[in-house]
Amino acid sequence: MTTELTDVATQDSGLFGRPIFEDPEARALSRVGVVDVGSNSVRLVVFDGAARSPAYFYNEKIMCALGAGLAQTGRLNPEGRKRALAAIARFQHLAKGMRLYGVTAVATAAVREADDGPDFCAEVLRETGVQIHVIDGAEEARLSAQGVLLGWPGAYGLVCDIGGSSMELAEIIDGEVGRRVTSSLGPFKLRDTKGGKKGRKAYINETLDRLHAEMGNQKNRLFLVGGSWRAIARIDMHRRGYPLAVLHEYRMTATAVQKTARYIAEHDLEELRHKCGISSSRMELVPLATEVLKGVLRRFQPYDIAISSYGIREGMLYEQMPEHVRRRDPLIEACHFSEAKDARLPGFGRSLYKFILPLFKNAKYEKQRLLKAACLLHDVNWRAHPDYRAETCFDTTTQSNLGGLKHSERVFLGLALLHRYRNRREGTRFEAIYDLIDERTQKEAEVLGKAMRFGAMLWMQNREDMGELYWRPKKRELHLILPPAAGALYGEVSEARFHSLCRALDAEPKVKFSKK
Protein backbone atom coordinates (compact mmCIF):
# COMPACT_ATOMS: atom_id res chain seq x y z
CA MET A 1 0.00 0.00 0.00
CA THR A 2 2.96 2.38 0.27
CA THR A 3 5.86 3.11 -2.00
CA GLU A 4 9.49 3.03 -0.91
CA LEU A 5 10.30 6.45 0.42
CA THR A 6 14.05 6.74 0.17
CA ASP A 7 17.22 4.81 -0.39
CA VAL A 8 17.76 2.54 2.58
CA ALA A 9 20.71 3.99 4.46
CA THR A 10 23.24 5.77 2.35
CA GLN A 11 21.74 9.15 1.49
CA ASP A 12 21.15 12.08 3.81
CA SER A 13 17.43 11.57 3.27
CA GLY A 14 17.63 7.83 3.94
CA LEU A 15 16.35 5.98 6.96
CA PHE A 16 19.59 6.73 8.77
CA GLY A 17 20.11 10.14 7.26
CA ARG A 18 20.20 13.29 9.37
CA PRO A 19 16.98 13.39 11.42
CA ILE A 20 14.57 15.88 9.95
CA PHE A 21 13.73 17.46 13.32
CA GLU A 22 17.20 19.07 13.18
CA ASP A 23 16.19 20.92 9.99
CA PRO A 24 15.31 24.61 10.60
CA GLU A 25 12.14 24.29 8.50
CA ALA A 26 11.06 21.30 10.55
CA ARG A 27 11.80 23.04 13.86
CA ALA A 28 9.22 25.64 12.86
CA LEU A 29 6.67 22.81 13.01
CA SER A 30 7.82 21.51 16.39
CA ARG A 31 4.75 22.86 18.22
CA VAL A 32 1.66 23.69 16.18
CA GLY A 33 -1.86 24.33 17.50
CA VAL A 34 -5.07 23.56 15.59
CA VAL A 35 -8.69 24.22 16.60
CA ASP A 36 -11.25 22.16 14.69
CA VAL A 37 -14.80 23.54 14.96
CA GLY A 38 -16.88 20.61 13.79
CA SER A 39 -20.59 19.88 13.66
CA ASN A 40 -20.41 17.59 16.69
CA SER A 41 -17.27 18.61 18.60
CA VAL A 42 -14.81 21.45 19.04
CA ARG A 43 -11.26 20.29 19.61
CA LEU A 44 -7.83 21.74 20.31
CA VAL A 45 -4.81 19.69 19.24
CA VAL A 46 -1.24 20.82 19.83
CA PHE A 47 1.35 18.82 17.92
CA ASP A 48 4.90 18.48 19.18
CA GLY A 49 7.98 16.33 18.63
CA ALA A 50 9.36 15.05 15.34
CA ALA A 51 7.87 17.20 12.58
CA ARG A 52 7.15 14.27 10.24
CA SER A 53 5.57 12.14 12.97
CA PRO A 54 4.33 14.52 15.65
CA ALA A 55 3.14 13.57 19.10
CA TYR A 56 -0.02 14.96 20.61
CA PHE A 57 1.32 17.44 23.14
CA TYR A 58 -2.23 18.44 24.05
CA ASN A 59 -5.64 17.17 22.92
CA GLU A 60 -8.97 18.37 24.30
CA LYS A 61 -12.45 17.87 22.88
CA ILE A 62 -15.79 19.42 23.86
CA MET A 63 -18.94 17.81 22.46
CA CYS A 64 -20.86 20.97 21.53
CA ALA A 65 -23.24 19.54 18.88
CA LEU A 66 -23.23 22.81 16.92
CA GLY A 67 -24.96 21.07 14.02
CA ALA A 68 -27.82 19.54 16.03
CA GLY A 69 -31.14 20.70 14.56
CA LEU A 70 -29.45 22.56 11.68
CA ALA A 71 -31.48 20.75 9.01
CA GLN A 72 -34.73 21.95 10.64
CA THR A 73 -33.85 25.47 11.77
CA GLY A 74 -31.04 26.49 9.42
CA ARG A 75 -29.18 27.82 12.46
CA LEU A 76 -26.53 26.58 14.85
CA ASN A 77 -27.67 24.85 18.01
CA PRO A 78 -27.96 27.79 20.52
CA GLU A 79 -26.66 25.80 23.49
CA GLY A 80 -23.89 24.31 21.37
CA ARG A 81 -22.93 27.79 20.22
CA LYS A 82 -22.46 28.95 23.82
CA ARG A 83 -20.39 25.90 24.66
CA ALA A 84 -18.26 26.28 21.52
CA LEU A 85 -17.51 29.92 22.32
CA ALA A 86 -16.50 29.01 25.87
CA ALA A 87 -14.32 26.17 24.59
CA ILE A 88 -12.52 28.36 22.06
CA ALA A 89 -11.92 31.03 24.71
CA ARG A 90 -10.38 28.36 26.95
CA PHE A 91 -8.26 27.03 24.08
CA GLN A 92 -6.92 30.50 23.35
CA HIS A 93 -5.80 30.89 26.97
CA LEU A 94 -4.20 27.45 26.88
CA ALA A 95 -2.34 28.39 23.70
CA LYS A 96 -0.88 31.45 25.41
CA GLY A 97 0.19 29.32 28.37
CA MET A 98 1.92 26.93 26.00
CA ARG A 99 3.67 29.86 24.31
CA LEU A 100 2.13 29.12 20.95
CA TYR A 101 2.29 32.06 18.60
CA GLY A 102 -1.32 31.44 17.73
CA VAL A 103 -3.59 28.64 16.69
CA THR A 104 -5.13 27.93 13.31
CA ALA A 105 -8.89 27.47 13.60
CA VAL A 106 -11.10 25.92 10.93
CA ALA A 107 -14.83 25.30 10.82
CA THR A 108 -16.59 22.75 8.66
CA ALA A 109 -20.13 21.88 7.57
CA ALA A 110 -22.27 23.20 10.44
CA VAL A 111 -20.75 26.69 10.48
CA ARG A 112 -20.51 27.02 6.70
CA GLU A 113 -24.17 26.01 6.18
CA ALA A 114 -25.81 27.79 9.11
CA ASP A 115 -27.49 31.16 8.51
CA ASP A 116 -25.82 32.45 11.65
CA GLY A 117 -22.42 30.93 10.85
CA PRO A 118 -20.83 34.28 9.89
CA ASP A 119 -22.25 35.88 13.06
CA PHE A 120 -20.77 33.07 15.18
CA CYS A 121 -17.34 33.52 13.60
CA ALA A 122 -17.52 37.28 14.21
CA GLU A 123 -18.48 36.69 17.84
CA VAL A 124 -15.57 34.29 18.34
CA LEU A 125 -13.14 36.80 16.85
CA ARG A 126 -14.53 39.62 18.98
CA GLU A 127 -14.54 37.65 22.24
CA THR A 128 -11.39 35.55 21.87
CA GLY A 129 -9.26 37.01 19.08
CA VAL A 130 -9.37 33.68 17.23
CA GLN A 131 -9.99 33.94 13.47
CA ILE A 132 -12.05 30.99 12.26
CA HIS A 133 -11.44 29.93 8.65
CA VAL A 134 -14.61 28.39 7.23
CA ILE A 135 -13.67 25.82 4.59
CA ASP A 136 -15.87 24.31 1.91
CA GLY A 137 -16.54 20.61 1.48
CA ALA A 138 -13.91 20.06 -1.20
CA GLU A 139 -11.24 21.66 0.98
CA GLU A 140 -12.39 19.61 3.97
CA ALA A 141 -12.01 16.46 1.86
CA ARG A 142 -8.53 17.50 0.73
CA LEU A 143 -7.29 18.24 4.25
CA SER A 144 -8.68 14.95 5.58
CA ALA A 145 -6.90 13.08 2.79
CA GLN A 146 -3.67 14.90 3.64
CA GLY A 147 -4.14 13.77 7.23
CA VAL A 148 -4.22 10.19 5.99
CA LEU A 149 -1.01 10.84 4.04
CA LEU A 150 0.67 12.02 7.24
CA GLY A 151 0.38 8.46 8.53
CA TRP A 152 0.56 6.55 5.24
CA PRO A 153 3.09 8.22 2.90
CA GLY A 154 2.55 7.15 -0.69
CA ALA A 155 -0.84 5.63 0.11
CA TYR A 156 -3.58 5.11 -2.45
CA GLY A 157 -7.29 4.49 -2.09
CA LEU A 158 -10.45 6.33 -1.07
CA VAL A 159 -10.68 8.51 2.04
CA CYS A 160 -14.13 8.74 3.58
CA ASP A 161 -14.48 11.39 6.31
CA ILE A 162 -17.74 11.57 8.22
CA GLY A 163 -18.62 14.49 10.47
CA GLY A 164 -21.82 15.46 12.21
CA SER A 165 -23.33 17.29 9.23
CA SER A 166 -21.44 16.05 6.17
CA MET A 167 -19.44 13.24 4.64
CA GLU A 168 -16.54 13.80 2.25
CA LEU A 169 -14.78 11.48 -0.17
CA ALA A 170 -11.29 12.03 -1.56
CA GLU A 171 -9.15 9.93 -3.85
CA ILE A 172 -5.44 9.51 -3.07
CA ILE A 173 -2.99 8.09 -5.61
CA ASP A 174 0.76 7.73 -4.93
CA GLY A 175 0.71 10.28 -2.16
CA GLU A 176 -1.36 12.88 -4.03
CA VAL A 177 -4.97 13.96 -3.47
CA GLY A 178 -7.15 13.59 -6.55
CA ARG A 179 -10.90 13.87 -7.05
CA ARG A 180 -12.99 14.85 -4.05
CA VAL A 181 -16.67 15.40 -3.32
CA THR A 182 -18.86 16.37 -0.38
CA SER A 183 -22.35 15.38 0.73
CA SER A 184 -24.88 15.92 3.53
CA LEU A 185 -24.62 12.35 4.85
CA GLY A 186 -23.65 13.40 8.36
CA PRO A 187 -25.68 11.75 11.15
CA PHE A 188 -27.14 15.07 12.38
CA LYS A 189 -28.59 15.71 8.94
CA LEU A 190 -29.85 12.15 8.59
CA ARG A 191 -31.55 12.26 11.98
CA ASP A 192 -33.75 15.09 10.71
CA THR A 193 -34.53 13.54 7.30
CA LYS A 194 -38.24 13.50 6.46
CA GLY A 195 -40.03 10.20 5.88
CA GLY A 196 -38.61 8.23 8.78
CA LYS A 197 -36.40 5.22 8.19
CA LYS A 198 -37.77 4.66 4.67
CA GLY A 199 -37.15 8.27 3.65
CA ARG A 200 -33.68 8.21 5.19
CA LYS A 201 -32.75 5.04 3.32
CA ALA A 202 -33.92 6.53 0.02
CA TYR A 203 -31.92 9.71 0.67
CA ILE A 204 -28.77 7.75 1.56
CA ASN A 205 -29.07 5.60 -1.57
CA GLU A 206 -29.73 8.58 -3.84
CA THR A 207 -26.78 10.51 -2.43
CA LEU A 208 -24.38 7.56 -2.58
CA ASP A 209 -25.36 6.85 -6.18
CA ARG A 210 -24.43 10.45 -7.02
CA LEU A 211 -21.11 10.20 -5.16
CA HIS A 212 -20.27 6.95 -6.91
CA ALA A 213 -21.02 8.49 -10.30
CA GLU A 214 -18.69 11.41 -9.52
CA MET A 215 -15.84 9.38 -8.01
CA GLY A 216 -16.01 6.29 -10.23
CA ASN A 217 -14.93 2.83 -9.13
CA GLN A 218 -12.69 2.87 -6.06
CA LYS A 219 -11.80 -0.72 -5.22
CA ASN A 220 -8.53 -0.09 -3.43
CA ARG A 221 -8.28 0.54 0.30
CA LEU A 222 -10.98 2.55 2.05
CA PHE A 223 -9.62 4.87 4.76
CA LEU A 224 -12.25 5.80 7.33
CA VAL A 225 -11.81 9.17 9.08
CA GLY A 226 -14.10 10.56 11.76
CA GLY A 227 -15.42 9.88 15.24
CA SER A 228 -18.47 7.88 14.16
CA TRP A 229 -16.34 5.50 12.09
CA ARG A 230 -13.94 5.10 15.02
CA ALA A 231 -16.86 4.29 17.31
CA ILE A 232 -17.99 1.54 14.91
CA ALA A 233 -14.42 0.20 14.90
CA ARG A 234 -14.37 0.12 18.71
CA ILE A 235 -17.55 -1.94 18.67
CA ASP A 236 -16.08 -4.25 16.02
CA MET A 237 -13.01 -4.77 18.25
CA HIS A 238 -15.29 -5.56 21.19
CA ARG A 239 -17.37 -8.00 19.14
CA ARG A 240 -14.27 -9.83 17.91
CA GLY A 241 -12.40 -9.77 21.21
CA TYR A 242 -9.53 -8.07 19.40
CA PRO A 243 -6.57 -7.81 21.81
CA LEU A 244 -4.80 -4.62 20.64
CA ALA A 245 -6.88 -1.54 21.47
CA VAL A 246 -5.28 0.80 18.94
CA LEU A 247 -7.71 2.32 16.44
CA HIS A 248 -5.20 3.74 13.98
CA GLU A 249 -4.55 1.18 11.19
CA TYR A 250 -7.21 -1.18 12.56
CA ARG A 251 -8.49 -3.26 9.66
CA MET A 252 -12.02 -4.41 8.89
CA THR A 253 -13.72 -6.18 6.02
CA ALA A 254 -17.14 -5.59 4.50
CA THR A 255 -18.29 -8.85 6.07
CA ALA A 256 -17.07 -7.72 9.49
CA VAL A 257 -18.96 -4.42 9.12
CA GLN A 258 -22.16 -6.32 8.32
CA LYS A 259 -21.71 -8.48 11.42
CA THR A 260 -21.01 -5.45 13.58
CA ALA A 261 -24.06 -3.63 12.19
CA ARG A 262 -26.23 -6.58 13.28
CA TYR A 263 -24.42 -6.67 16.63
CA ILE A 264 -25.25 -2.98 17.19
CA ALA A 265 -28.90 -3.51 16.23
CA GLU A 266 -29.25 -6.48 18.61
CA HIS A 267 -27.71 -4.84 21.70
CA ASP A 268 -28.71 -2.10 24.08
CA LEU A 269 -26.80 1.02 23.01
CA GLU A 270 -26.28 2.32 26.53
CA GLU A 271 -24.81 -0.96 27.69
CA LEU A 272 -22.68 -1.25 24.55
CA ARG A 273 -21.24 2.25 24.86
CA HIS A 274 -20.10 1.59 28.43
CA LYS A 275 -18.37 -1.61 27.36
CA CYS A 276 -16.65 0.09 24.43
CA GLY A 277 -15.81 3.44 26.05
CA ILE A 278 -17.96 5.58 23.72
CA SER A 279 -19.63 8.83 24.80
CA SER A 280 -23.43 8.96 24.89
CA SER A 281 -23.55 11.81 22.35
CA ARG A 282 -21.38 9.80 19.93
CA MET A 283 -23.30 6.57 20.47
CA GLU A 284 -26.55 8.25 19.44
CA LEU A 285 -25.07 8.77 15.97
CA VAL A 286 -23.58 5.29 15.50
CA PRO A 287 -26.69 3.51 14.10
CA LEU A 288 -27.09 6.27 11.48
CA ALA A 289 -23.41 6.17 10.58
CA THR A 290 -23.64 2.39 10.24
CA GLU A 291 -26.40 2.76 7.65
CA VAL A 292 -24.17 5.08 5.63
CA LEU A 293 -21.12 2.84 5.92
CA LYS A 294 -22.99 -0.20 4.64
CA GLY A 295 -24.07 1.84 1.62
CA VAL A 296 -20.53 3.09 0.96
CA LEU A 297 -19.22 -0.47 0.99
CA ARG A 298 -21.93 -1.69 -1.41
CA ARG A 299 -21.12 1.08 -3.91
CA PHE A 300 -17.34 1.16 -3.82
CA GLN A 301 -16.48 -2.44 -2.79
CA PRO A 302 -12.99 -1.74 -1.37
CA TYR A 303 -10.67 -4.68 -0.97
CA ASP A 304 -10.03 -3.72 2.65
CA ILE A 305 -10.86 -1.03 5.20
CA ALA A 306 -8.43 0.87 7.44
CA ILE A 307 -9.31 3.18 10.31
CA SER A 308 -7.33 6.42 10.34
CA SER A 309 -7.00 8.42 13.54
CA TYR A 310 -5.48 11.14 11.38
CA GLY A 311 -7.80 13.55 9.64
CA ILE A 312 -8.37 17.24 9.02
CA ARG A 313 -6.24 18.45 11.95
CA GLU A 314 -3.28 16.34 10.88
CA GLY A 315 -3.95 17.43 7.30
CA MET A 316 -3.49 21.04 8.36
CA LEU A 317 -0.10 20.16 9.81
CA TYR A 318 0.81 18.27 6.63
CA GLU A 319 -0.20 21.35 4.65
CA GLN A 320 2.56 23.35 6.36
CA MET A 321 5.30 20.78 5.66
CA PRO A 322 7.83 21.40 2.88
CA GLU A 323 7.99 18.60 0.35
CA HIS A 324 11.30 17.20 1.60
CA VAL A 325 9.74 16.77 5.06
CA ARG A 326 6.69 15.02 3.62
CA ARG A 327 8.91 12.48 1.87
CA ARG A 328 10.43 11.24 5.12
CA ASP A 329 9.30 8.03 6.78
CA PRO A 330 7.12 8.97 9.81
CA LEU A 331 8.12 5.83 11.72
CA ILE A 332 11.85 6.38 11.38
CA GLU A 333 11.58 10.10 12.14
CA ALA A 334 9.64 9.38 15.33
CA CYS A 335 12.21 6.79 16.38
CA HIS A 336 15.10 9.16 15.64
CA PHE A 337 13.43 11.78 17.80
CA SER A 338 12.81 9.31 20.63
CA GLU A 339 16.41 8.11 20.56
CA ALA A 340 17.78 11.67 20.62
CA LYS A 341 15.50 12.57 23.52
CA ASP A 342 15.61 9.45 25.69
CA ALA A 343 18.52 7.09 24.87
CA ARG A 344 21.68 7.04 26.96
CA LEU A 345 23.93 7.11 23.90
CA PRO A 346 22.05 8.83 21.05
CA GLY A 347 23.33 7.66 17.68
CA PHE A 348 24.25 4.17 18.85
CA GLY A 349 21.15 2.77 17.14
CA ARG A 350 22.76 3.31 13.76
CA SER A 351 25.81 1.23 14.74
CA LEU A 352 23.64 -1.42 16.32
CA TYR A 353 21.63 -1.74 13.11
CA LYS A 354 24.80 -2.21 11.08
CA PHE A 355 25.98 -4.85 13.57
CA ILE A 356 22.81 -6.98 13.53
CA LEU A 357 22.01 -6.63 9.80
CA PRO A 358 23.97 -9.78 8.71
CA LEU A 359 21.34 -11.84 10.54
CA PHE A 360 18.72 -10.48 8.14
CA LYS A 361 20.63 -10.40 4.85
CA ASN A 362 17.56 -11.07 2.71
CA ALA A 363 15.27 -8.61 4.48
CA LYS A 364 13.14 -6.50 2.15
CA TYR A 365 12.64 -2.78 2.58
CA GLU A 366 9.53 -3.19 4.75
CA LYS A 367 11.45 -5.39 7.19
CA GLN A 368 14.59 -3.23 7.12
CA ARG A 369 12.69 -0.20 8.36
CA LEU A 370 11.37 -2.26 11.29
CA LEU A 371 14.90 -3.44 12.11
CA LYS A 372 16.08 0.16 12.09
CA ALA A 373 13.17 1.37 14.17
CA ALA A 374 13.91 -1.32 16.77
CA CYS A 375 17.59 -0.38 16.93
CA LEU A 376 16.73 3.29 17.40
CA LEU A 377 14.31 2.44 20.20
CA HIS A 378 16.39 -0.26 21.89
CA ASP A 379 17.50 1.94 24.80
CA VAL A 380 14.79 4.59 25.19
CA ASN A 381 13.10 2.85 28.14
CA TRP A 382 16.23 2.45 30.24
CA ARG A 383 14.69 4.51 33.06
CA ALA A 384 11.96 1.92 33.66
CA HIS A 385 12.39 -0.37 36.66
CA PRO A 386 14.45 -3.43 35.62
CA ASP A 387 11.68 -5.80 36.74
CA TYR A 388 9.22 -4.15 34.33
CA ARG A 389 11.48 -2.84 31.58
CA ALA A 390 10.71 -5.60 29.07
CA GLU A 391 6.95 -5.23 29.49
CA THR A 392 7.24 -1.44 29.39
CA CYS A 393 9.00 -1.72 26.03
CA PHE A 394 6.25 -3.89 24.59
CA ASP A 395 3.47 -1.78 26.02
CA THR A 396 4.81 1.59 24.90
CA THR A 397 5.74 0.37 21.42
CA THR A 398 2.40 -1.27 20.66
CA GLN A 399 0.34 1.54 22.18
CA SER A 400 2.36 4.62 21.22
CA ASN A 401 1.42 7.20 18.60
CA LEU A 402 3.56 5.95 15.71
CA GLY A 403 2.57 6.50 12.10
CA GLY A 404 3.39 4.19 9.21
CA LEU A 405 2.85 0.98 11.20
CA LYS A 406 0.41 -1.88 10.70
CA HIS A 407 -0.82 -3.61 13.84
CA SER A 408 1.26 -6.67 12.98
CA GLU A 409 4.33 -4.45 12.68
CA ARG A 410 3.60 -2.88 16.08
CA VAL A 411 3.55 -6.33 17.61
CA PHE A 412 6.79 -7.33 15.86
CA LEU A 413 8.54 -4.21 17.14
CA GLY A 414 7.11 -4.62 20.63
CA LEU A 415 8.15 -8.26 20.82
CA ALA A 416 11.67 -7.52 19.58
CA LEU A 417 12.09 -4.82 22.23
CA LEU A 418 10.66 -7.12 24.89
CA HIS A 419 13.39 -9.64 23.99
CA ARG A 420 15.94 -6.83 24.19
CA TYR A 421 15.48 -7.11 27.97
CA ARG A 422 14.03 -10.57 28.49
CA ASN A 423 14.89 -14.02 27.15
CA ARG A 424 11.40 -15.51 27.33
CA ARG A 425 8.15 -13.99 26.09
CA GLU A 426 5.91 -16.45 27.94
CA GLY A 427 4.32 -15.40 31.21
CA THR A 428 3.44 -11.80 30.31
CA ARG A 429 0.01 -10.19 30.10
CA PHE A 430 0.51 -9.67 26.36
CA GLU A 431 0.33 -13.24 25.12
CA ALA A 432 -3.02 -12.77 23.35
CA ILE A 433 -1.49 -9.90 21.36
CA TYR A 434 1.42 -12.08 20.19
CA ASP A 435 -1.05 -14.08 18.11
CA LEU A 436 -1.53 -11.13 15.75
CA ILE A 437 1.71 -12.34 14.11
CA ASP A 438 2.57 -15.92 13.17
CA GLU A 439 5.11 -18.15 14.91
CA ARG A 440 7.79 -17.51 12.29
CA THR A 441 7.50 -13.75 12.71
CA GLN A 442 7.53 -14.11 16.49
CA LYS A 443 10.78 -16.05 16.15
CA GLU A 444 12.28 -13.32 13.94
CA ALA A 445 11.37 -10.76 16.59
CA GLU A 446 13.06 -12.91 19.23
CA VAL A 447 16.25 -13.13 17.15
CA LEU A 448 16.24 -9.36 16.60
CA GLY A 449 15.66 -8.67 20.29
CA LYS A 450 18.42 -11.01 21.42
CA ALA A 451 20.80 -9.61 18.82
CA MET A 452 20.16 -6.12 20.18
CA ARG A 453 20.51 -7.45 23.73
CA PHE A 454 23.97 -8.78 22.89
CA GLY A 455 25.01 -5.84 20.68
CA ALA A 456 24.19 -3.40 23.47
CA MET A 457 26.97 -5.03 25.51
CA LEU A 458 29.51 -3.75 22.95
CA TRP A 459 28.70 -0.16 23.82
CA MET A 460 31.60 1.92 22.55
CA GLN A 461 32.29 5.53 21.69
CA ASN A 462 34.17 4.37 18.57
CA ARG A 463 31.17 2.60 17.17
CA GLU A 464 32.96 1.23 14.12
CA ASP A 465 34.94 -1.15 16.36
CA MET A 466 31.97 -3.14 17.65
CA GLY A 467 32.93 -6.26 15.76
CA GLU A 468 31.13 -8.24 13.08
CA LEU A 469 28.59 -11.03 12.85
CA TYR A 470 28.61 -13.62 10.08
CA TRP A 471 25.55 -15.85 9.85
CA ARG A 472 25.89 -19.11 7.93
CA PRO A 473 22.39 -20.58 7.95
CA LYS A 474 23.22 -23.73 5.98
CA LYS A 475 25.91 -24.71 8.45
CA ARG A 476 23.90 -23.29 11.38
CA GLU A 477 26.93 -21.32 12.52
CA LEU A 478 27.02 -17.78 13.90
CA HIS A 479 30.50 -16.27 13.73
CA LEU A 480 31.50 -13.32 15.90
CA ILE A 481 34.71 -11.47 15.09
CA LEU A 482 35.84 -9.04 17.76
CA PRO A 483 38.61 -6.43 17.37
CA PRO A 484 40.82 -5.78 20.43
CA ALA A 485 38.73 -2.91 21.80
CA ALA A 486 35.47 -4.87 21.57
CA GLY A 487 37.17 -8.04 22.79
CA ALA A 488 37.79 -6.37 26.12
CA LEU A 489 34.02 -5.97 26.49
CA TYR A 490 33.31 -9.65 25.84
CA GLY A 491 32.86 -10.78 29.43
CA GLU A 492 30.69 -13.42 31.10
CA VAL A 493 27.40 -11.60 30.60
CA SER A 494 28.25 -10.75 27.00
CA GLU A 495 29.11 -14.38 26.31
CA ALA A 496 25.86 -15.58 27.88
CA ARG A 497 23.86 -13.19 25.71
CA PHE A 498 25.70 -14.25 22.57
CA HIS A 499 24.96 -17.89 23.36
CA SER A 500 21.30 -17.01 23.94
CA LEU A 501 21.20 -15.45 20.48
CA CYS A 502 22.77 -18.58 19.01
CA ARG A 503 20.14 -20.77 20.67
CA ALA A 504 17.39 -18.60 19.18
CA LEU A 505 18.96 -19.24 15.75
CA ASP A 506 19.63 -22.91 16.52
CA ALA A 507 23.24 -22.10 15.67
CA GLU A 508 26.67 -23.10 16.90
CA PRO A 509 28.61 -20.12 18.30
CA LYS A 510 31.99 -19.31 16.76
CA VAL A 511 34.02 -16.52 18.35
CA LYS A 512 37.25 -15.10 16.98
CA PHE A 513 39.36 -12.33 18.50
CA SER A 514 41.15 -10.40 15.78
CA LYS A 515 44.42 -8.56 16.33
CA LYS A 516 43.51 -5.50 14.28
Image (spheres, rainbow, N blue to C red):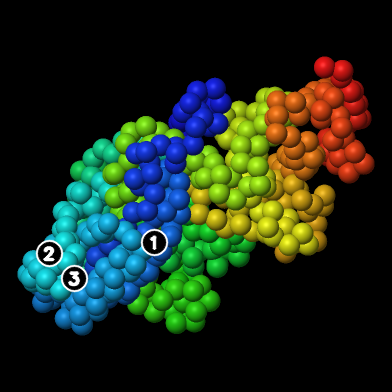
Q: Nearer the viewer, residue 484 or 147?
A: 484
The disc placed on residue 229 is 1
Q: CA distance from mark 1 to mark 2?
A: 23 Å
**Which residue in the protein does label 2 denote?**
113
Mark 2 or 3, nearer chain start:
2
Q: Nearer the viewer, residue 461 or 500?
A: 461
Q: Is residue 157 left or right of residue 339?
A: left
Mark 1 or 3, nearer chain start:
3
**Which residue in the protein does label 3 denote?**
128
Mark 1 or 2, nearer chain start:
2
- Badge 3 marks a residue whose secondary structure is helix
Q: Disc 2 residue type?
A: Glu
Q: Disc 3 residue type?
A: Thr
Residue 114 on image: x %, y %: 11, 68
Residue 128 on image: x %, y %: 18, 70
Q: Disc 1 residue type?
A: Trp
Residue at 70% x, 34% y is 461
Residue at 85% x, 25% y is 484
Whether pointer 1 and pointer 2 mark residues with C-beta atoms closer than 8 Å, the reply is no
**Quadrant in which the C terminus is drawn:** top right
Neighbour tally class for label 3: few under 14, some 14-19, many 20 plus, Cα within 10 Å = some
Work out whether 499 lies above or below 49.
Answer: above
Whether pointer 1 and pointer 3 mark residues with C-beta atoms closer than 8 Å, the reply is no
Q: Is residue 51 left or right of residue 214?
A: right
